[in-house]
Image: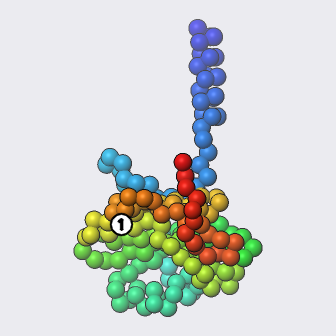
Amino acid sequence: MKLNKLILILLTICFLGCEEKSDKLFWVSDNSGQQSDFLFLAESTNVSPINGDSLKFLLTPEEVNSIARDSTTFKNYGKIYEGEKFRVHILLLSMKTVGRFYCFIIRTYDNNYKIIDDYELAAWTESEKQYCFGSINKDLIIERKCNYKDTPDIMQITDEGKIIMTSIHKP
């Protein structure tokens, strides 16, 4: 009996130790069953809207104007990467409209918080029934799949912080 318990414990440790580590820095997973990673991140996560001095550092002047004009809200989900030349943040744009409208944006900034580039990582446009889900990994490769396209978009953040289309394909 003791031997069976020992074998069971060893197998459990081996199984847990063999689990593949994720190399993703941030991701929004596709819906599965009754669960929505997207809606949980957008509606349930306790992240405050961007306000005060952060507005001028993280957003464009047009985005700042849209906050009052269009009932738009931006939230900063944080810095997910920082290198010598640039940093990468995840922002959530939400807008009060018919149905839910959310968009997770990957945005790169130089060391003075000047915007270099941005890309829609994930989007939820309920009124048009268009949904995209995506991830960015430690190599700064972005993969996004949308329900209205057959193939995923694969992007790469360059050493200068630009977001470009890449020919890298996952097996």
Q: At 69% from the left edge and 72% from the top edge, which residue is drawn?
A: 159
Q: Which x, y percent locates residue 114?
A: 62, 85
Q: Is residue 23 above or below residue 1?
A: below
Q: Secondary structure at mark 1?
A: strand
Q: At 57% from the left edge and 79% from the top edge, which residue is drawn?
A: 117
Q: At 25% from the left edge and 70% from the top edge, which residue is drawn?
A: 127
Q: Quadrant of the N terminus?
A: top right
Left/right placement of residue 23 relative to residue 100 reads: right
Left/right placement of residue 97 relative to residue 155 reads: left
**Can residue 48 be seen in the rendering of this structure?**
no
**Can residue 149 be seen in the rendering of this structure?**
yes
Type of amino acid at the residue the image marks with label 1: Trp
Q: Which x, y percent locates residue 163?
A: 58, 73
- The foreground one among 168 and 9 is 168
Residue occupying the far top of the picture: 1
Residue under label 1, please give it.
124
- The foreground one among 18 and 4 is 18
Left/right placement of residue 8 relative to residue 126 reads: right
Residue occupying the far right of the picture: 84
